[in-house]
């Protein structure tokens, strides 16, 4: 796939985002991607909280480490996935609609 969005300058990217997020599909996609990002951030914060609270209470076991690591990995996947999907959607819109 072409990378038209990545080759745009800052003003063109801002204009492309503005046009895309004003479409019905763009509004829906923005909600979904923001939700994914928020879920990822909450997961990262909760995994850090688990490790810190276990360390403070001196009751941290291997299960806490494993659960925290798995949660952290999946949360990072959510965040990276949301960023990649956002750029792919904007790139597709730039290819099809922007001239």
Image (cartoon, rainbow, N blue to C red):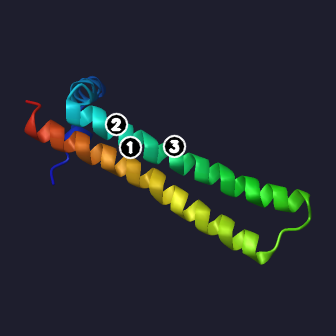
Q: Which quadrant of the view contains residue 81?
A: bottom left
- In the image: residue 97, left or right of residue 49: left
Label 2 with label 1: CB-CB less than 8 Å: yes
Q: Which quadrant of the view contains residue 87?
A: top left
Label 3 with label 1: CB-CB less than 8 Å: no
**What quarter of the picture does the C terminus occupy?**
top left
- In the image: residue 2, left or right of residue 18: left
Q: From mark 2 to mark 3, how far is it between C-alphas?
A: 12 Å
Q: Earlier in the sequence, mark 3 or mark 1?
A: 1
Q: Which quadrant of the view contains residue 66?
A: bottom right
Q: From mark 3 to mark 1, how far is it between C-alphas?
A: 9 Å
Crowding at label 2, few (<14), some or many (≥20) Cα neighbours within 10 Å? some
Q: Is residue 6 above or below residue 51?
A: above
Q: Position of residue 79 (x, y in %)?
A: 47, 51
Picture disc at residue 38? 3
**What quarter of the picture does the N terminus occupy?**
bottom left
Crowding at label 1, few (<14), some or many (≥20) Cα neighbours within 10 Å? some
* Residue occupied by mark 1: 33
Q: Earlier in the sequence, mark 2 or mark 3?
A: 2
- In the image: residue 43, left or right of residue 17: right
Picture residue at 32% right of the left edge, 44% below the top: 86
Q: From mark 2 to mark 1, how far is it between C-alphas?
A: 5 Å
Q: Position of residue 62 (x, y in %)?
A: 77, 76
Label 2 with label 3: CB-CB less than 8 Å: no
Q: Secondary structure at mark 2?
A: helix
Picture residue at 27% right of the left edge, 23% below the top: 11
* Residue occupied by mark 2: 30
Picture residue at 52% right of the left edge, 57% below the top: 76
- In the image: residue 14, left or right of residue 38: left
Q: Secondary structure at mark 3?
A: helix
Q: Nearer the viewer, residue 55 or 29?
A: 29
């Amino acid at each position: 796939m072409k990378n038209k969005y990545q080759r745009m300058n800052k003003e063109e990217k801002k204009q492309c985002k503005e046009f895309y997020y004003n479409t019905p599909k763009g509004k829906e996609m923005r909600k979904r991607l923001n939700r994914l990002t928020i879920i990822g951030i909450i997961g990262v914060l909760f995994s850090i909280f688990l490790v810190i609270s276990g360390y403070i209470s001196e009751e941290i076991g291997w299960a806490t480490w494993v659960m925290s690591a798995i949660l952290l990995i999946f949360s990072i996947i959510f965040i990276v996935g949301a960023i990649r999907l956002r750029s792919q959607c904007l790139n597709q819109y730039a290819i099809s609609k922007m001239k």
